[in-house]
Amino acid sequence: MRALSGPSTEVIGLVLAAGRSRRFDGDKRRALLPDGRSLLGASIETACQAFAEVWIVLRPDDDAQDLGIPPGVGIVRSELADLGMGHSLAAGIQHLASSRARAVAILLGDMPWIAPASLRTLARAADPQRIVLPWYTGQRGHPVIFGRQFWPALELTRGDQGAKELIKANAALCDSIQLDDPAILRDVDTRADLSQFGADTERGS
């Protein structure tokens, strides 16, 4: 693994945030954390601490300024976002096709509690020919890092399954990284999740 103390310049962070939050009862991207930051804003801030280049996938009608997207974060519009996360992922990868990055980290816009150090650990393991999978207590979490060998296949993802089938089909090319970070499993689907995970983070668990 290569030394990496600051944000990675070889791995791009791609934040998927074009979903409709149907289980949340409202736009969860704007939901506030106990520290006053929005759920999406905090997720982006975490990504920016680990990756020098960060892009976010939004819906065509989203107002980036209203969502608080910070300067320097690139924006990709997914015209087919309502058809599932796979379409948003494909739109993001297509936009990055000309990049010289070794790999891309696929992050979710509703996971603000992942430690930046965990993301840096994953970035150190990135390889153009490999897929990096984070694990905590026997469960696979996020983000997954795809070497650029897999980008053409990611451009073809569709529906709600994202890249699950791609990972399954390339099990021999996956590297598992064990992390001491329960937040890699904590994505917010409901308001109860927001309250529970936020409280757990404040207690330091």
Image (cartoon, grey):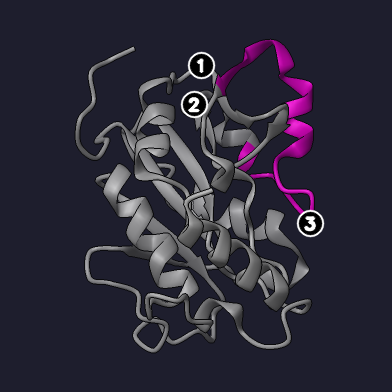
At a point 39% along the width and 28% down the height, the residue shown is 121
Earlier sequence position, callout 1 versus callout 3: 1
Considering the numbered disc 1 on the image, is that residue within a helix, a strand or a loop?
Answer: loop
Circle 1: residue type: Gln
The amino acid on which the numbered mark 3 sits, given as a three-letter code, is Asp
Q: Mark 2 or mark 1, which is nearer the start of the sequence?
A: 1
Q: Residue beneath label 1, please? A: 129
CB within 8 Å, label 1 to label 3? no
176 drawn magenta: yes
- Callout 3 secondary element: loop
Where residue 160 sits in the image (x, y, percent)?
A: 79, 56
Expressed as whole percent of the image width and height from the top left, the position of residue 59 reads 56, 76
Task: Residue at 47%, 75% (x, y): give it.
Answer: 33
The residue lying at 68 percent from left, 78 percent from top is 191
2 and 3 marks in contact (CB < 8 Å): no
Q: Is residue 64 left or right of residue 48?
A: right
Q: Is residue 16 above or below residue 141?
A: below
Provide the residue span drawn in magenta: 154-177
Q: Which residue is mark 3?
A: 160
Residue 78 appears in view: yes
Say which residue label 2 marks: 147
